[in-house]
Amino acid sequence: MTNVVATNQTILVVGGGISGMTAALEAAECGKDVILVEKNPSLGGRVSQLYKYFPKLCHPTCGMEINLRRIKANRKLRVITMAEVTEVTGDTGNYTVKMKVSPRYVNDNCTACGACKDVVAAEFEDEYNYGVMDSKRKGAYLPFFMAYPQRYVIDPRLIGTADADKAQAACQYEAIHLDMQEETQTLNVGAIIWATGWKPYDANKIQPYGYDHIPNVITSVEFERMLDQMGPTGGKILRPSDKKEAKDIAFIQCAGSRDHNYLKHCSRICCTASLKQTHYVREQYGDEGKSTIYYIDIRVIDRFEDMYLEAKADKTVHFIKSKVANITQDKPTGNPILHGVDTEGYHRYSNPHDLVVLAIGMEPSVDFNTLGVKITVNEHGFIENDPSNGGMFGAGVATDALDVNRALQSATASALRAIQVVNQVAATEGG
């Protein structure tokens, strides 16, 4: 790739999820020069992995398509994928940013025809599907069907193998270059928006819930991929242990959240996400399905309360006020058995279910203390809105655990703040 030209009147947006795309578009559509960098091969982030949004239960592909159309049409916005910021120096209005850009091994001649994928034999865990049902992808792959840029990627583990040579030979557009190397870029920018998003809490750490050894205990993000008709199960709710349909499903709230042993904070979205997922069960099975929500308390606010009231009125949805103590497995059936005390009736239970879904929390995807960026974060690692941050601003879930709507509001606010910074630079320099 060629060096990207940027000035102190350029806004850098780090992170190409829904918040980063929104912040970048808002700034670019106000006439500002914007560079959007994303560490993955394509834009979209966690939202692209959802089956449906709440509360309207519409598919995220609609919003993705609109944003991608806006990005393609805006000449003020440049996108760099497979790029990670490694160092930031300077101050408000004059930052020097170093980043490394990993090789894609595929240039922009690619038409996404898939010929390279067809000849490659090697497969790796499909990170887009969170590895659900041991899902795999080829070593030459398109991250997902709406990926932008719409270009294939050669997995670096393929380099030096016969598969890599086959992929290159199969490409009639000379798009595959196996000698691409990691590059270093240095940018001068006036303001930085950190839209680095979130990662699901590692359910392996919650030992009492058996995620690491009970096959039919999965996470809420994995359940989303399972419901997608283009996902690893073709949209069916299946048990990982035996691939049978799961009709009796338990949803455990605050799985690792609001707990001094794991995540101290409340991730806010988990209750609503589980309420949304009970809709999936009803869609699939009608009255034959059963959803049981184990909860400490239900935290739904504003318009989301309607989802709670609707679920309460649904005869297939049951609520048990309890923090589940632990989960064991019934060996003959493979059913997870939830153990605990119902705090409303104060009686012990040992309830079997076909499948357990852990509503895991959100934590920041970037440790800014490790990255060495001088930006204020709270005890949970989220970016604080602090004057000492200068011309650097957090956006979306980099600032707190937020639902999509609030993340977009945060992203728009960060874009306005960044615009003010570069406007002041322009005014000072007479630009």
Image (cartoon, rainbow, N blue to C red):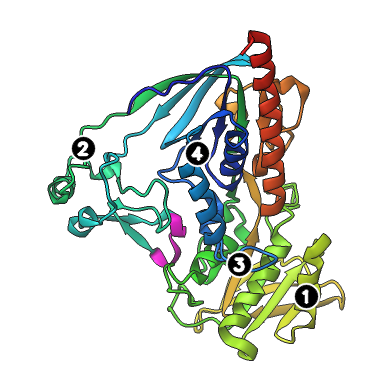
* Kind of residue indicated by mark 1: Ile
Count of marks placed on residues:
4
Please state which of residues 183 and 64 is positioned toward the viewer in this rendering.
Answer: 64
Closer to the chain start, of discs 4 and 1, is 4
Tag 4 and tag 1, C-beta contact below 8 Å: no
Residue with the mark numbered 2: 177
Residues packed near mark 3 inside 10 Å, few (<14), some (14 to 19) or many (20 plus): few
Task: Name the residue that disc number 1 marks.
Answer: 320
Give the quarter of the figure containing the N terminus: top left
37 sits to left or right of 404: left
Residue 275 sits in which quadrant?
Answer: bottom right
Please provide percent x and percent y for residue 260: 74, 47
Q: Which residues are magenta?
A: 128-134
Query: Residue 74 got which mark?
Result: 4
Q: Nearer the viewer, mark 2 or mark 3?
A: 3
Per the model, the C-alpha gap separating discs 4 and 2 is 28 Å
The location of residue 250, given as percent across then percent down, is: 65, 74
Tell me the element at label 4.
loop
Q: Are marks 4 and 2 in contact (CB under 8 Å)?
A: no
Q: Magenta stretch: dominant SS?
A: helix
Distance of label 3 from label 4 (alpha carbons): 26 Å
Label 3 vs 1, first from the N-terminus: 3
